[in-house]
């Protein structure tokens, strides 16, 4: 397994990502879209999720493909980003055809960033405009860290951010991850700069500092955020042709990467979830072995993306937490 060319989820051919940020609001939105509709599934493990149209992604539901997936700040207000994405897609002539109307299918999820120091006293919900702007910015290359839906993200002690990573398996299948790290837990060992995800680092993509020897297996963590104020939301993607049930299994396996990179994770206070998508560009090289490999690749790539998001965060005036680079 090796990193993809960009080390971004867009190494999965046919996918693009767009960011839109508002530094005054200290929030933003990120959109994943494709050259064509793509298959998708979701798995939720956190206790306080905020989602839109995720029921459509269940294996037994009618919808087989979606036009885009959005990740947004703003808590429940951020779900309006989906409206803007839908408007933009409809203007492009995209969407499920119903008579003379096209209805874009745009699931999404949000993180809580309402108490991060930004000005939230708006008179009109800003997230629809952010969603449409993010879609219009979609490209193969995009910024991680303090950008898009990761603009106002925080973790236990450090600024969070938007992360992404990719991996190419020896069989030629590509896996990518995109994540907003806004966790109750920490991405680094206590009092250290080493990332919990260090065992899965490829090269020096988040500092190359190696594994911390300071982990205390008996440590008892106390929450530093309130119920509903923390969430890590992610998308894992592949070019392998997978059914919705297989994608749901891939999303479930990817949660292992969240647990590897954030301590603690999947708490009652977090709304942790993972979307899984497939462009279907490549047949499975081996129908038994390849799905097994995809689960591990999705987990390790998501762990790396989480660390990269925190590693890439940049300081801004008014921050309530330091960045990893300031340690």
Image (cartoon, rainbow, N blue to C red):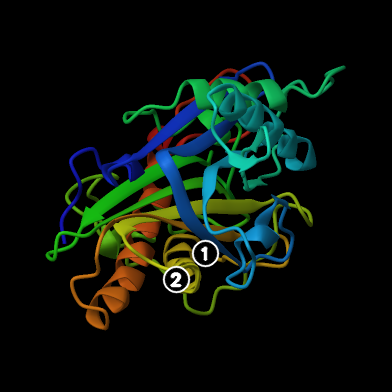
Mark 1 surroundings within 10 Å by alpha-carbon count, few (fewer than 14), some (14 through 19), many (20 or more): many
- Identify the element where label 1 is drawn: loop
Image point (23%, 38%), residue name = 6
**Corner quadrant of residue 167:** bottom left
Viewer-nearest residue: 324 or 26: 26
Image point (71%, 43%), residue name = 112
- The residue pinned by badge 2 equals 256
Q: Find residue 288 and report its horizontal and vertical position in percent.
A: 26, 83
Viewer-nearest residue: 69 or 218: 69
Mark 2 surroundings within 10 Å by alpha-carbon count, few (fewer than 14), some (14 through 19), many (20 or more): some
Q: Find residue 135 and report its horizontal and vertical position in percent.
A: 52, 27
The residue furthest right is 123
Cα distance between the residues tagged 1 and 2: 12 Å
Q: Find residue 160 and report its horizontal and vertical position in percent.
A: 52, 41
Q: Is residue 55 visible in this depiction of the protein?
A: yes
**Corner quadrant of residue 250:** bottom left
The residue furthest left is 170
Image-based side of 81 in relation to 160, left or right: right
- The residue pinned by badge 1 equals 263
- Identify the element where label 2 is drawn: helix
Image-based side of 65 in relation to 196, left or right: right
């Amino acid at each position: 397994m090796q990193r993809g060319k960009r080390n971004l989820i867009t190494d999965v051919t046919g996918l693009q990502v767009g960011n839109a940020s508002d530094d005054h609001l200290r929030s933003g939105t990120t959109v994943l879209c494709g050259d064509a509709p793509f298959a998708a599934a979701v798995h939720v493990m956190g206790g306080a999720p905020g989602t839109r149209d995720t029921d459509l992604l269940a294996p037994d539901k009618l919808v087989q493909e979606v036009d885009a997936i959005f990740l947004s700040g703003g808590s429940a207000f951020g779900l309006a980003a989906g409206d803007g994405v839908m408007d933009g897609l409809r203007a492009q002539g995209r969407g499920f055809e119903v008579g003379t109307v096209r209805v874009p299918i745009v699931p999404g999820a949000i993180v809580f960033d309402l108490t991060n120091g930004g000005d939230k006293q708006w008179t009109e919900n800003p997230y629809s405009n952010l969603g449409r702007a993010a879609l219009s910015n979609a490209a193969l290359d995009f910024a991680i860290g303090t950008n898009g839906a990761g603009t106002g993200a925080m973790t236990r002690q450090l600024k969070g951010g938007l992360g992404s990573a990719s991996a190419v398996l020896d069989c030629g299948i590509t896996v990518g991850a995109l994540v907003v790290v806004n966790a109750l837990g920490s991405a680094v060992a206590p009092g250290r700069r080493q990332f919990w995800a260090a065992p899965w680092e490829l090269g020096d993509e988040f500092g190359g500092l190696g594994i911390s020897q300071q982990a205390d297996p008996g440590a008892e963590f106390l929450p530093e955020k309130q119920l509903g104020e923390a969430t890590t939301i992610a998308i894992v993607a592949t070019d392998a042709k997978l059914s919705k049930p297989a994608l749901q299994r891939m999303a479930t396996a990817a949660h292992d990467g969240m647990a590897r990179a954030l301590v603690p994770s999947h708490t009652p206070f977090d709304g942790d979830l993972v979307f899984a998508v497939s462009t279907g560009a490549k047949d499975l090289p081996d129908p038994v072995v390849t799905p097994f490999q995809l689960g591990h690749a999705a987990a390790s790539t998501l762990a790396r993306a989480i660390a990269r998001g925190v590693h890439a965060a940049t300081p801004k005036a008014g921050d309530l937490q330091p960045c990893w680079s300031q340690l």
